[in-house]
Each structure stands twice: as C-alpha cells, then as structure tokens.
Image (spheres, rainbow, N blue to C red):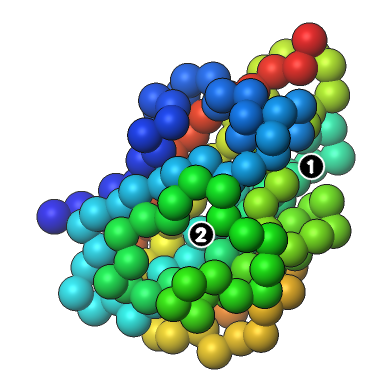
Amino acid sequence: MKLEIRSPAFGYGAVIPQQYTGLGRDISPPLEWSGVPGEARSLALVVEDPDAPMGTWTHWLVYALSPQTRGLAEDQPRTQYLAGGARQGINDFRRLGYGGPLPPPGPPHRYFFRLYALDCELDLPPGLNRARLLEAMKGHIVAQAEWMGTFQRK
C-alpha cells in the first residue's frame, strides 16, 4: 500500500474553497491519509506555495504526528500542540499553525500539502520554521505523498 493524502474539501488540482483561505475564514481544510508504512515512527506535514513572488511560502508545518493518525479535522487550532502531542511550526505569516492562501492578485498559485512518513520520532519543540524542520527530517523520510490545490485572487 502506498502513502496517500487527500482533502475531502477539494479535488487534486482544484480550487481551494474560500473558507480555507485568507479571504475567507482562514481555517485549515480537512485532510485524510492512508498507507502509512509500518516502519514509520512519526509523520510530518508541510504546506507550501512555490509560486509566491518572494519564493516558496510556508503555510503550515505539523510534525511529531503519530503514525496511527489518519488525518486532521477541519479548523485545527493555532496552538503549539495538537491532539496526540503533534507540534506546529511557524508559518511565513510568522504565526503558529495554518495560514491559508492569500496570494497577490494575478495568476493562480499552487498549494502543496505534503505528508512525510519518518523512520524516527522528531523530539523537537513547537515553533520550528520550515528550514529547521526539513533539516531534521533529512535522511529519515521513508515515504511521502502530496495533494495540491490552487487559489487565485483576482
């Protein structure tokens, strides 16, 4: 079985509903996953926009997720810890938790929700930035999956 991630709120490559963006309620979308490999000791989620004018923009970091977790419900709190002890990092809006799409007016941006299965537990404090998280994950990724949505501000 292969690691897979999806959102029941929007299809792959489809427009992310406004409630999950900075123009709406700015709440995190529901996510579901399956196929976590048996050797996984933890999971990490990285959500980013590679089309941002200043370079890749981080929208959400969640790490130290239990490998038994099968998803995240809609509207996760913007706290250091989530249910089960998972931790949230700092996004490029300089706050904990999810920050929804809010691109400048122009062409659509792509938003990648990447789930990583790791062969170790990341015993790291909450509040990491993307660079520190990716460095800690280096050499420990046993599987990864992605879901992509788009959003455009006109």
Tell me: 68 left or right of 59.
left
Q: Residues within 10 Å of mark 1 (few under 14, many from 20)?
A: few
Q: Foreground residue, 137 or 47?
A: 47
* Residue located at (37% from left, 56% from top): 71
Q: Residue furthest top?
A: 154
Q: Secondary structure at mark 2?
A: strand
Q: Is residue 101 visible?
A: no
Residue under pointer 2 = 45
Name the mark nearer the viewer: 2 or 1.
2
Q: Quadrant of residue 117?
A: bottom left
Q: Residue furthest bottom?
A: 123
Residue 115 on image: x %, y %: 43, 56
Residue 138 on image: x %, y %: 52, 74
Q: Foreground residue, 4 or 73?
A: 73
Amino acid identity at mark 2: Leu
Q: Residue furthest left?
A: 1
Vertical side of 134 occupied by 54: above or below: above
Vertical side of 35 occupied by 137: above or below: below
Vertical side of 29 occupied by 149: above or below: above
* Residue 82 - label: none
Tell me: 74 left or right of 42.
right
* Residue 55 - label: 1
Q: Secondary structure at mark 1?
A: loop
Vertical side of 51 occupied by 129: above or below: below
Point out the image quarter for the C terminus. top right
